[in-house]
Image (cartoon, rainbow, N blue to C red):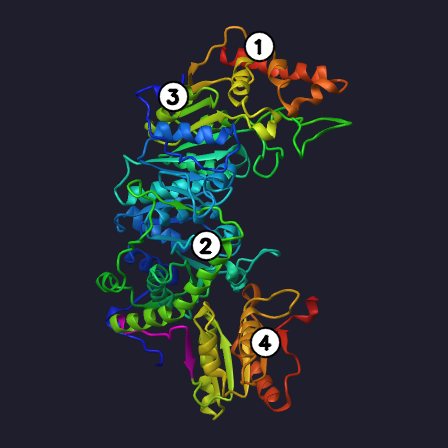
Amino acid sequence: MSATRNIDKSKMVVVEGSYSVAHSVKVCRPNVISAYPITPQTHIVEDLSQFMADGEIPNCEYINVESEFSAISALVGSSAAGARSYSATTSQGLELMHEVLFNISGMRLPVVMTVANRAVSAPINIWNDQQDSISQRDTGWIQLYAEDTQEAADMTAQAFKIAEDKDVLLPAMVCMDGFILSHVYEPVILLEQDLVDKYLPPFEPDSVLDPKNPKSFGAFADPSTYTEFRFLQQKAMDKALQKIENAANEFNELFGRYYGGLIEEYETKDAEIIIMAMGSIIGTVKDVIDERRSKGEKIGLLKVRSFRPFPKEAIKRVLKDAKMVVVLDKNISIGLNEGALFTETKSCLYNTYIDVPVAGYMIGHGGRDIPVGTIEKIIDEAKVAMEDGIDIESQFTDVREELI
Amino acid sequence: MSPKSDPKLESKSLLAPGHRGCAGCCDAMAAKFTLMAAGEDCIVVSPTGCLEVMTTPYPETSWEVPWIHSLFENASAVASGIDAALRAKGKLGKTKIIAIGGDGATLDIGMRSISGAFERGHDFTYVCIDNEAYMNTGVQRSGATPFGASTTTSPAGKVSFGNQRPKKNMPAIMVAHGSPYVATTSVGYPKDMIRKVKTATEVEGPTYVHAHAPCTTGWGFDTSKTVEIAKLAVETALWPMFEIENGELTKVRKIKNPKPVEDYLKMQRRFKHLFTKEGGEAEIKKIQALADKNVVDFGL
């Protein structure tokens, strides 16, 4: 199924990306919001605070915490007490949460958090890349990446549905590129309360902190039991693969918008070269593909919406007939000289019959602009590599040699 | 007198036996007294530490009330979230929320978390079980380790008399946060501790009870001596017991004739060097001066 967009213009309003996400959070009827301000996440939590001040979120408490560490820690308590729980952060704030992120997933608490993706220090930089959330990939959180503000808003409701599913019960991050999506004003359809109420059932977990039925949360597990907790987290991630598809399909039925489930394919059917990426860079890549397609070049795009769980089978199915794959990453594993999507794509093709060269480009670090010309250049290099083989397997993009 | 003999107190122990605490464990006593005070309608948050480890070896638990452990440094934030959840769901007002953690989890690594939660005014009670070092990991120095104590990271040695800093004054810090009720107590005085925790849970807002808690393994004394040592800390004026309500010192446990601090120190391995090492007498005098100051400051 290809992407569909309900664009009833009479329903569209021009709002900031942060507002559309905050609105989505509001209509998802959260019980506890706990957040600490950090650029470029601030507008989301400011909008939510204003909703609270205007009495627009019933049965909800907003905790103005003293740090991101406590922001997410408070949600351990609130979620365990049966409250639908939400936070938002980015960059340094997300890294400060690191220890708690493992804890929330291990305790199987379906917290949802928006990450307005931003580079990490040093050097300090407030602009967009995806190093922050990629660095949390092994914490046991579902990670979804949005292409534009409408998708970020819609994905928020989907994230609650996926996370709270009793077969899943894992926390979920909705990742949206900082500034590029959080601060852009675009026409969007704000999620309708009545439709969200149909889409998202109330949060009613089986295990809660309740004096009438006392249970212990967060026990001490020795080597005889610890492994099984990890095993079951992985099983839950496996189940989430289908739940993410289901959540996208059900959303489409009610709202008329669909962006793919785990992945979205764009012009991949007969594509010789397939570009892979996540987040707002997708828009630029689609524009370049449109232009190249008009010249008869067989180029397609594989947009990864779900980075965790990693959709290995879906990716293999799309790449199996390609002649060349190019992966764009707004992150780097320093010391490996590769971005995470690139590494993991290569990994999932290994031990299969699929034999396609894969080249990686690390791009857009610290908010470095990604102009159309850069994508054009990457495609031109891919065309050469497709014929002659890969010269450089993984590389930085648009490095300013004069600064080195 | 056993606290169970007082009909006004809960008779059923909400901390089930079979936990892995040492004989003479101060944590088990503190937890039991806290639950006697709180009753069944409470939710308990524990940071990482001895109490958490010894009471919840999966799949077993000693807790007969809902209980949650997240991490070492975030118990007060977790309690904040529970408070918010109960508030949002209209359940606030009956169920008591109690965080109960060790000194390291409270006044060292948990300082940010407890400070934020008290500043925000969440309705919960924090009980600090102060055994004056990181006992769970093997007796390392904390900010609550007293002057002159030898720990594994502040050991006495050829050129050292052990920890050279006084205890962080956590009760004063919590008073400075505007807490409506701050009290000190001791596991050596069960009725005092139960009364103070009960009062704390009944006062609205963030309240704080700091319980002095001798640790048999960490301090180095016989497992039968926990209460005796706890009482000596009070009787020597090294551990003043008081209540501060809305910033005012309202109640103090008076001591008729304070005993010399040697009576307390000599019973513990952690202070042994003060009696065997040259120059130890001068160090003991400094500790006596701390006790004398408590007598003056609190009118003991």
Disc 4: which residue: A360
What range of the chain is rendered magenta?
A255-266
Residue occupying image coordinates x 61% and y 14%: B263
Q: Nearer the viewer, residue B263 or A18?
A: B263
User: Mark 3, mark 1: which one is toward the viewer?
Assistant: 3
SS under mark 3: helix
Label 4 to label 2: alpha-carbon separation: 32 Å
Label 2 to label 3: alpha-carbon separation: 39 Å
Chain assignment, label 3: B
Badge 4: how crowded within 10 Å, few (<14), some, or many (20+)?
many
Please identify the quadrant where the N terminus of chain A is shown: bottom left
Residue A265 placement, left or right of A394: left
Position of B76 relative to B178 (above/below)? below
Residue A139 in the image: state x and y as whole percent.
50, 58
Residue A227 in the image: state x and y as whole percent.
51, 57
Disc 3: which residue: B3
